[in-house]
Amino acid sequence: KTETKDYTIGFAQTGVNDEWRRAMNQSMKIQTSLYSNVELIILDGEDNIENQIQDIEELIAKNVDVLIVSPVKSQPITPIVEKAFNKGIPVLIVDRKTEGQNYTAYLGGDNYQVGVDAANYLASLSNERKKVVEIRGLSGSSPALERSIGFKTTIEKNDNLEIVKSIEGNWESYSIKDSLSKVLNEIKDIDYVFAHNDRMVLGAWEVAKEKNLHNKIGFVGVDGLPGENGGIKLVQDNVLLATILYPTGGDEAIRLAMKILNGESVPKNNLLETTVIDFRNADIMWNQFNKINQQQQDILKQQSTIDKQEETYSSQTNILKLLLGL
Ligand code: FRU
């Protein structure tokens, strides 16, 4: 704990190399700034399990009051999370899960539903038989597994859709380019590509564009971030047919951590809702997100004004004390 703060929340983040993680950190910081007695420490795991284990060790040693973890992969991060939990530190797992039940609460988007939504969306587009390629996220991370199960189970119920290939990626666009290129050379009449996030689906679109197939294939991704490089813009620009919103849950995570700090009981499993973003609602989503973004910037501005006023006040008090010989 620092001198001025009563509580410390430590967050072992997967990494900060992508926009989704940065957005998550940003909303956590803004939410934390609303509580004057709480400090938030975010450590960057650089998408590497060894680093993330080190980070969690560090946060345990710092004696944080709540530990938040978004695991790179489920299985290898479980023992260190259990170590923290068994020491009595409340543990909140976000976005990607650990194995077993040794944590206080989980918070994240409903990844099974993400897969179901993507499949139902494709099913709604046509009554003819269509061929689908699935591009999966990092194997061993729970969203990749759950999105895949939701997607496959729903496709299997539909006679018109068939998954002709499922490709393994690692959430990043470069990871799928060679394998998708081969698949597009082998199978000529692919109708849809569903990738587990927007970074990979953009990579897929780029591969298809090189082969001049980008207008023949319909692309669906996941995340639906606002901003110039986000999924909403890709839908508006007709690169994607749709993206399934996967909320970062940054502000909810801090709210949940505060409840835990206040000794309130919280549900073990906290699922955030998802929704399909396509040409019908992309503009509305874009405007909504811009408004929220503006409000967040206003909060940050107010916060820094308050900080400045506090500084002025405390230096004035010091001068006064000096003058009065206190
Ligand atoms: C960000 C990200 C997202 C994806 C999520 C799954 O690092 O790759 O694109 O939806 O992680 O955990």
Image: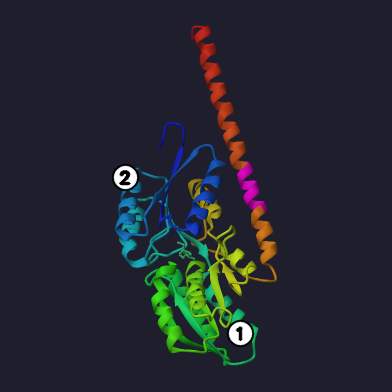
Number of numbered callouts drawn: 2
Q: Main secondary structure of the magenta part?
A: helix
Residue 158 pos. (x, y %): 57, 89
Looking at marks 2 and 1 on the same chain, the residue that comes earlier in the sequence is marked by 2
* Residue 288 appears anywhere in the view: yes
> Is 296 part of what is drawn in magenta?
yes
Residue 151 in the magenta stretch? The answer is no
Figure quadrant of residue 102: bottom left
Marks 2/1 in contact by CB < 8 Å: the verdict is no
> Residue 287, percent across and down?
69, 58
Residue that label 1 marks: 123
The tag on residue 196 is none
For mark 2, give the secondary structure: helix
- Mark 1 Cβ inside 8 Å of ligand 1: no
Front-lying residue, 85 or 74 = 74
Residue at 65%, 54% in the rendered image: 290
Whether residue 98 sits left or right of residue 159 in the image: it is left
Between residue 18 and residue 81, name the one nearer to us: 18
* Residue 101: % across, % down: 40, 65
Q: Amino acid at mark 1?
A: Ala
The answer for how far apart the CA atoms under marks 2 and 1 are is 51 Å
The scheme the figure's colours follow is rainbow
**What range of the chain is rendered magenta?**
291-298
Q: Which residue has dot 2 on it?
A: 61
Which type of secondary structure does the marked residue at label 1 adopt?
Answer: helix
Which is closer to the viewer, label 2 or label 1?
A: 1
